[in-house]
Amino acid sequence: MFENLTDKFEKAFKVLKGQGQISEINVAETLKEVRRALLDADVSFKTAKEFTNTVKEKALGRDVLKAVSPGQLMTKICHEELVELMGGNEVEINLKGSPAIILMSGLQGSGKTTFSGKLANYLKSKKGKNPLLVACDVYRPAAIDQLHVLGEQLGIEVYSNKEEKNPVAIAQAAIQHAKAKNFNVVIVDTAGRLAIDEKMMAEIAAVKSAINPTETLFVVDAMTGQDAVNTANTFNEKINFDGVVLTKLDGDTRGGAALSIKAVVNKPIKFVGTGEKMDALDVFYPKRMADRILGMGDVVSLVERAQEQFNEEEAKKLQRKIQKDTFDYNDFLSQIQQVKKMGNMKDLMGMIPGVGKAMKDVEIEDDAFKSVEAIIYSMTPAERANPNLINVNRKNRLAKGSGTNIQEVNKLIKQFEDTKKMMKMMSNPKNMMGMMKKMKGMGGMPGM
């Protein structure tokens, strides 16, 4: 995510590396690179210029503390301004009303229908809501079918009427249905077009006027860059939406939409879509996004994803098994499956400070654990429960049964043993204290 932009910001800050103080000359050189980075990311010239002018004003004349280098200070100022550029603080979705009505808008192909399913899943699983999805795209039967498929996958009801060709009538009937059946959120998926036209705008405006939604969201493909901002501006002039959703942020995204849209439209980005799975939806946090753009990682989001998969009772059982030295391949497999639920592996690695840059040229496939799982599934129940049973003959059988080779089986066994040792060490506070003292004796870890 934004790897190219991150690299260019890093290159810009290198101008100040080793400089004793900030001057007008080195600030100008740095900001020239920063402006170029923003323009390459498809940020509008006006927005890029305003950003660099603000950074320049704040940087010049600032005293550089002895503990802070000019490069670090410039990074800090750019970070603060990036956060402001993207909205400052996160803005929650408005769920007031009985039911709360959310109207989806956007062009065809922006991921509107998929996002409607993701949002319904998010509100059901994380907010405890009972959502109803409404199919109001009367021009594409496939869009109605897609919404029904998503609803079935998620266990969420979908209201549609293929005989009715008036989206206003469908939306109004759906809201009456929601009130009668005690749904507390209604998500209305409307039709999109391949380009903006008057008929489309009149239709979405009529639907909004008829149902008076508590929240109107504009869904846009983040990969379209500055075009996304221009489209958002047109939609906002016609329907005055409340917030923006950026989809496909996990793709080859330059970042222009995320960086420009708040400045141009003055509406907050509320959600980002980061994958095809129904749980690949994140609340948009400007500070966390600025952290990632500047290569600082996003540890908070990583911890939150881990907590979503965390089961306290299971964790206690696992701790007892580790202390009794009975951690086995069943437990190892369970841990792998929990990590997989957290999302795309490369995206997760990018949340760890410093790791994202190191991994940028490394291809991590979504099925990175496939061979490991295959080997474990090839084990007998006795072998999974008793790792010491696995000898040379059994290794050969596991390699054949999993479609791998003996080297991969040996690699898995080593990973298992290393994980077991590490978990045992971490479960003992005395060991952890000893490890901390050793680090201190060696000069400690950076920042400790």
Image: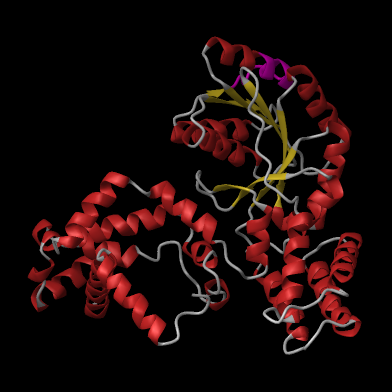
Judging depth in this view, the residue of 266 and 329 nearest the camera is 266
Is 170 one of the magenta-colored residues? yes
Relative to 313, residue 176 above or below: above
Q: Is residue 261 left or right of residue 327?
A: right
Relative to 330, residue 237 above or below: above
Give the residues in magenta: 160-172
Relative to 286, residue 419 above or below: below
Q: Picture coordinates of residue 68 (x, y %)?
A: 70, 78
Q: Residue furthest top?
A: 180
Q: Is residue 378 visible?
A: no
Q: Residue at the spot x=90%, y=64% of the render?
A: 45
Q: Is residue 142 left or right of residue 346?
A: right
Quarter the N terminus occupies = bottom right
Q: Picture coordinates of residue 360 (x, y %)?
A: 57, 74
Relative to 370, residue 243 above or below: above
Q: Is residue 148 visible?
A: yes
Q: Residue at the spot x=65%, y=51% of the render?
A: 285
Judging depth in this view, the residue of 345 and 190 nearest the camera is 345
Q: Picture coordinates of residue 230 (x, y %)?
A: 85, 49
Q: Residue at the spot x=76%, y=74% of the render?
A: 74
Q: Is residue 409 left or right of residue 343?
A: left
Judging depth in this view, the residue of 188 and 300 nearest the camera is 300
Total numbered circles: 0
